[in-house]
Image (cartoon, rainbow, N blue to C red):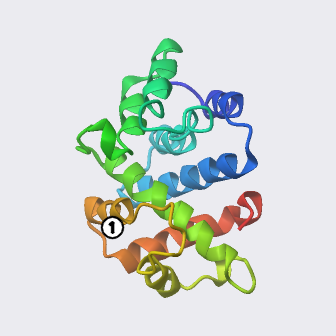
Amino acid sequence: MSTRAEAQALLFEFTEGDALRKHARAVEEAMRAYARWFGITDPAEIEKWGIVGLLHDFDYEKNPTEETHLHVGTRVLRERGWPEEIIEAIASHADYMKIPRDTPLKKAIYACDELVGFIGACVKVRPTRKVADLPPESVVKKLKDKAFARSVDRSYVYGGAEAIGRPMLEHVAYLIEALKPIAEEIGL
C-alpha cells in the first residue's frame, strides 16, 4: 500500500495550481468521511479512500481532455506500482472511462468529486465566503441554475447521489460537514 505522503508528492509533481491542489485535498477529506459513512473503521482502509480522493485529478492540469485525463494518470500510477484497486477507483470517477462503479469506493469518488467542486463555487458567492455558513438548501437550489458554475457537470452530481443512495440534500449536508474541519486549509 502506498502512503498519503507518496500520494501528495505525486499530486504536487503533476499539479502546480493551488486551486486544483485544494480541490484534491477537499475530495480527500470528503472520501474519508464517506469511508466512515459506509461503516469503515480500519484506519488503513480510510487512508486508502483518502488517497483516491487526493489523487483523482492528479494528472488533470497537464492532461485536461477526455483523450488524456485519467488515461495518462492510470498509466503513471501503474508504472509507479500503485495498487490496482486505487487506480481503478480513480479512473472510475469519469463516465467516459466506462468503469463499472461496483464498489462503495468507486461510488463515493463519483459522488464526491463534482459536488465538492460545486460546493466550493457556492461558498465563493456567499457573503461570508465560508463553508460553515453555507446552507445545504442553497447548494441544491444553485444546482438548478444552469448558468451558475457551468463547468460542473450536473449529471455527475445527481448520478453520484444516486450511486450512493442518498437524497441530494442529505448528501450535500454531509459533504459540507466533512469540509468544515479543513475549511481554512482549502480556502473555504
What x and y, as percent, mark residue 187? 75, 63
- Residue 131 locus on image (x, y percent): 65, 75
Measuring from the top left, give residue 123's x and y in whole percent.
Answer: 65, 75
Question: Which residue occupies the foreground of this view, 84 or 22?
Answer: 22
Lateral position of residue 45 relative to residue 62, left or right: left
* Label 1: which secondary element: helix
Q: How many marks?
A: 1
Residue 140 in sight from this viewpoint: yes
Residue at image position (77%, 64%) is 184
Please state which of residues 142 and 150 is positioned toward the viewer in this rendering. 150
Q: Residue at x 60, y 55 (%)?
A: 26
Residue 156, by quadrant, is bottom left
Instruction: Kindly identify the amino acid type of the residue bearing the numbered disc 1.
Output: Tyr
> Could you tell me which quadrant the C terminus lies in?
bottom right
Q: Is residue 26 left or right of residue 174?
A: right
Q: Residue at x 54, y 69 (%)?
A: 149
Q: Quick one: 69 or 80, which is closer to the camera? A: 69
Is residue 40 in sight in this rendering?
no
Count neighbours of disc 1 (C-alpha within 10 A) and say few if under 14, some if 14 to 19, many if 20 or more: some
Residue 58 x %, y %: 58, 36
Above or below, 158 against 36 in this view is below
19 w.r.t. 171: above or below: above
Residue 84 placement: quadrant: top left
Occupied quadrant, residue 6: top right
Q: Which residue is mark 1?
A: 158
Question: Which residue is most to the front?
Answer: 147
